[in-house]
Structures are given as C-alpha cells and as structure tokens.
Amino acid sequence: MLVVLSDTHGRDSARLEGRTAEAVDAADLVIHAGDYMTETVLDAFEARCDIRGVYGNNDPPAVRERVPAEELVEWAGLRIAVVHGHEHTDTALSMLGRQTNADLLVFGHSHAPEFRDGPVPMLNPGSHADPRWNRPGHAELEFDDAAGRAEGRLVEPAGEVFERFVVDPRPLE
C-alpha cells in the first residue's frame, strides 16, 4: 500500500492518529507533499516508515537541505510526480504532470483533500493533522495487478472513507 500525506505542520512529532497511523505503519511507501515544519517531524517520519517527499513553503532550511522541491517517485509501476504546490497554479501543476510523464501528480499546500481526474490525475491528500477549515485526510492507494491500475481512497484519521478513485498507468510518450 502507498500512503500519501501532506501538511503535517508539527513541531515535535508526525502527529499520526487512528487510521492514518495504522496506514502509515502498514504502508510499503509513504509520500509526503511537504510542510513537515521542523526537522524533528521529518526525523519522526523517517524513523517510522519508508518515506519520500518534498519540502513545503513552511519548511525551514534544515528540512529543505534534506528533501527536494520536486520529486518523481516510482511505485508499483506508476510514475508519481510530487510537489508541494505553493508555487504552482492549477495549469502549472497539470503541465508538471505532463512534462514528467507522470501517471499521478501529488500536491499539498491547500489542506483540502481532493482527487481530480484528467489527462494527468492530481491528488491532494489534505492534512491529517492540521485540516484548518477542511476535512482532515490522507490518501491510500493499492495496486490491483489483475486490473493493472491503482485503486485509491481519501480517508479521515477516524477511518471514514470519503472518496474513492482510480489511477491508470499512462503509456510512455
């Protein structure tokens, strides 16, 4: 399973509770779309799980030195472009997905969980720990070998699934 998180906004821990903590512990890989907030939070994630990710606009230099601004992650045959999104319009996000030939573009920043289908599907997992005026959330994806695609869901830390989606691999261009 792949778990996607963003916008932890922590000071001293990964702020994982309930289903989010269970999913992170069960994941083969965790992708984080930035705004850990401190190096201590990044350390907590790295100690707990196999994590790849990017920095966000609120991450200090110590975090920015350890994770990139953009990353292309391979998981289960899918190419996943990851960026925080604070410097990207919707058009720029879409173009980044196309330029990297991604099957999925992951972004954060808005704290609003959503999946947008399109030529390059876009996923914002929201924030599991600091949802602000949005629903708290994270994303879980499982690859279905028989169907040749990933089946995903947006999930609250309390465990409620509030959106389901599918990501199909794109042919290499």
Image: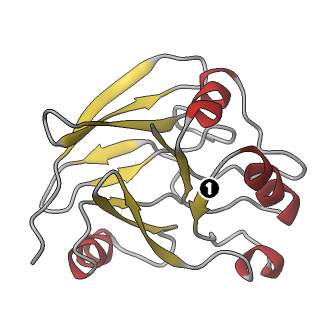
Q: Which residue is found at the position 30% from the left and 44% from the top? A: 115
Residue 89, above or below 99: above
Q: Which residue is found at the position 26% from the left and 68% from the top? A: 102
Which quadrant would the N terminus be assigned to in this image?
A: top left
Which quadrant would the C terminus be assigned to in this image?
A: bottom left
Residue 114, above or below 144: below
Horizontal and vertical percent position of residue 104: 29, 58
Residue 25, above or below 116: above
The residue wearing badge 1 is 51
Q: Which residue is found at the position 75% from the left and 44% from the top? A: 48
Nearer to us in this view, 130 or 123: 123
Horizontal and vertical percent position of residue 162: 38, 23
Task: Give the image quarter of residue 74.
Answer: bottom left
Q: Which residue is found at the position 69% from the left and 49% from the top? A: 8
Colour mode of the rendering: secondary structure
Horizontal and vertical percent position of residue 96: 30, 77
Total marks shown come to 1
Q: Amino acid at mark 1?
A: Ile
Left or right: 97 as drawn, with respect to 81: left
Left or right: 55 as drawn, with respect to 71: right
Q: Secondary structure at mark 1?
A: strand
| Crowd band around label 1 with a 10 angstrom C-alpha radius: few (<14), some (14–19), many (20+) | some
Nearer to us in this view, 59 or 13: 13
Horizontal and vertical percent position of residue 150: 26, 41
Query: Looking at the image, which residue sits at the far front?
Result: 146
